[in-house]
Image (cartoon, coloured by chain):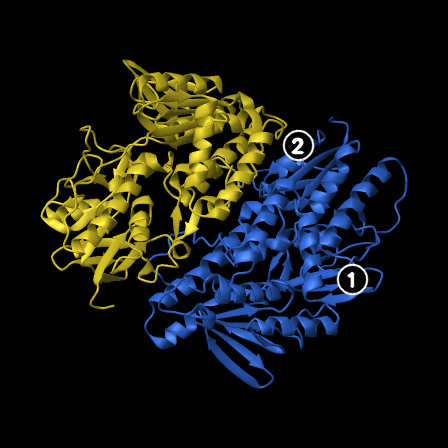
Chain colours: A yellow, B blue
Amino acid sequence: MASQHRVVIVGGGFGGLSAALRLGRAPVEVTLVDRCNYHLFQPLLYQVATGTLSPANIASPLRNILKRHKNTRVLLAEATGIDAANRRVILSDGSIEYDTLIVSTGSSHQYFGHDDWEEFARGLKTVEDATDMRRRILLAFETAERETDPEKLRAYMTFVIVGGGPTGAELAGALAEIARDTLRRDFRNIDPSQARIILVEGTDRVLPVYPPKLSEAARKMIERLGVIVRTGAMVTDVKKESVTVREGDRTETIPTRTVLWAAGVLGSPLGRIVAQETGATIDKAGRVSVEPDLTVAGHPEIYVIGDLANFVHQTGKPLPGVAQPAIQEGRYVAEAIARRLRGEKSRPFHYFDKGNLATIGRGAAVADLNWLQISGFPAWLLWIFVHLLYIVEFQNRLLVFVQWGWFYLTFDRSARLITGKNPLPLDL
Amino acid sequence: MASQHRVVIVGGGFGGLSAALRLGRAPVEVTLVDRCNYHLFQPLLYQVATGTLSPANIASPLRNILKRHKNTRVLLAEATGIDAANRRVILSDGSIEYDTLIVSTGSSHQYFGHDDWEEFARGLKTVEDATDMRRRILLAFETAERETDPEKLRAYMTFVIVGGGPTGAELAGALAEIARDTLRRDFRNIDPSQARIILVEGTDRVLPVYPPKLSEAARKMIERLGVIVRTGAMVTDVKKESVTVREGDRTETIPTRTVLWAAGVLGSPLGRIVAQETGATIDKAGRVSVEPDLTVAGHPEIYVIGDLANFVHQTGKPLPGVAQPAIQEGRYVAEAIARRLRGEKSRPFHYFDKGNLATIGRGAAVADLNWLQISGFPAWLLWIFVHLLYIVEFQNRLLVFVQWGWFYLTFDRSARLITGKNPLPLDL
């Protein structure tokens, strides 16, 4: 084993895991490093945040997924740095040597220079983010139920979602359904359906990466659920008890206790370290520029894939930070490594764009398949089918199916638990 | 509404929830106070701790369960005290008046005067306890995988369960199955089946409340799974890196990093406050003595039920702190309140003992039905049937069924996520 080519993959998301799976039969020694012991199906994280699914439904232990790959070991560790000269990954408790390195540590949120907003406007990237968001949403209703001051009550019943991309649209739709249907008969003093849900988007339309026609369809579906959509609106401040929004010259401060952040994305810190070590350029979103074969310029032994990579594909636009590019990149890199070991050359990475899907609520979604744009119920059926198909484990597929079936029939979200640090006395 | 009789129930466990459900059609105004927003099916909590089920599978939102009961409101609040003279429950953020009070706040662990042990030997009463225990168990294997020092490795691979009652036996069995089956092919450096699992019980047999024949059967089943059972063994110290056990004159210090506490039970703090306020006696386990009608002596308006009550039933022994007595007491109290309002008298509470069930592992359980004692596979089938029957929501029943089916067929526990505070660098 010691004489074999050592591939170290940092990050077990869609990109890293795809690479690891594809390398399972290659004559290499693979180490997958992740600080979580599971692969997370991030596209459904908003369903954990809104109480439809449990974390375990969308997370599969990495060891379990890779247990049949005898050439692969999983290391539960945090990669804190890279020593490119000596080909080592620095861990928080040790280090590990590589012959080829695949960096796929993804991204987290950014607050555009306002890191103090994070405390009041948590994003949605991890299981802990999702259970925290769930806690905040449910506690807002619980606190409202006990509030007698009408102004405070209004603030507790106001939810502001920042960012009108897929995550923001999904959160807004799910939140509206919770308020209108799931919690309908749960309270005695408040009427959850009176909750104000405000979706704030900086550009002039929701789902800005979709064709305008689908953005318009999505907006209508979101508004039909009772959500107030404000496009061309920039968030200029977030405080414990309010959000300030600027539209043109008009500035408004909205009293609210629950702000959900679905806006900026920032490449993980390891990207900056890769750039420092290799001289690669890094963009404002913290993404590392890569060559046509996904390596870092001057370092053919270092690949950067997934959200963290700034790869300009055939259409001249950078690839979006979603699952499909990451999966295809992971597979491409695995094959490129195997080819190189056989002395063969690889063609540049070519992204096959299958299209984009976003859901808004029950029976409401948009799908841009490039050759076809659909919205409404057919798009929603496609969305369900694709997401069930891609969930990693068979058992999870079955469980998610049962829970979705239940939920779509009854509106009941069974996973709406307030867990974590003791929230009492109530003080959002 | 204001003129109606106000019943306040503190605690939404088996006792409190049963009372609330039974009071749903009585001419009273019911307030159920709980610091959690869900009812927890505690008998299956060990399956969360060992990665078979998700918290949401065994927890149902209280508001959802009670939403059809228009006379009932749920208050998410922590009851910190009672003012019996003024008939008020003191909350951490306010207070609430009652005409009749039902105290059903249950119990937590006790460390027999060694509260410093809790840090290293967490018990299993809440969802947070269960996910923490799951984290510790999985991290022990993860750390062992990376440990090179053989002595430390042995400590990480040693699990000590303190207490040989039902919870201890269930944990020991589940842990043995995880090590032998679930994790079998997950690691590269360690063999999880070599884990040492030690069950320590102070009395001379496991499941001491069961008939000796069933204790013997249970011990054999536990040992068949590879668990080392040590009866007549007292834990005299728990430290970060070891547990000290005394058997007769022999004292041994066992190096371990994972101690699971399934021993002492202590009534919740509200019990002591009830005793102070009413003069009721309280026993060593923190349970409040109650009259034959489950009221506190001299306070016919205060009922104490469930784990927190010290009720001596017809056989002269106190009722065990399990679900059945709590459920029956809750129903009895609800009916007693309705009768009293109609001017009728109640007969004393009579416990109908349906028997006891404990499971050890796949296909292994014991059942004491009083008229019949069974063990092994038939007892296990009965255990499954009863537990599925009692899980509160239909959807949860279905989900648990699917997950059990999957798990019993494949040995795969899909919910083995390490969540919560970032565990890295590994340091148990």
Instruction: Determine whether, in the image, residue A204 is placed left or right of residue B222.
Output: left
Quadrant in which the C terminus of chain B is drawn? bottom left
Circles 2 and 1, Cβ within 8 Å, touching? The answer is no
Q: Relative to A71, does residue B254 appear above or below in the rendering?
A: below
Residue kind at label 2, given as amino acid type = Lys
Which residue appears farthest toward the right when viewing the image? B344
- In the image shown, does B351 or B176 lie closer to the viewer? B176
Residue B186, image x, y percentages: 41, 62
A130 sits left or right of B217 in the view: left
For numbered disc 1, what is the local secondary structure? loop
* Quadrant the N terminus of chain B occupies: top right
Secondary structure beneath dot 2 equals loop
Cα–Cα gap, marks 2 and 1: 35 Å
Q: Chain of mark 1?
A: B
Which badge, 2 or 1, comes first in the chain's sequence? 2
Side (left or right) of A75 relative to A178: left
Q: Which residue is mark 1?
A: B369
Q: In the image, which disc is placed on residue A163?
A: none
Total tally of numbered discs in the picture:
2
Relative side of B413 to B343, left or right: left
Q: Nearer the viewer, residue B3 or B399?
A: B399
Residue B352 coordinates in the image, percent (x, y): 82, 55
Query: Which mark's residue is nearer the viewer, 2 or 1?
Result: 1
Q: Which mark is residue B67?
A: 2
Q: Chain of mark 2?
A: B
Q: Which residue appears farthest toward the bottom when viewing the image?
A: B249
Q: Residue at x 28, y 61 (%)?
A: A93
The residue depicted at 58 percent of the width and 53 percent of the height is B404
How crowded is the residue under tag 1: few (<14 C-alpha within 10 Å), some, or many (20+)?
few
- In depth, the one of A315 and A44 nearer the eye is A315
Disc 1 residue type? Leu
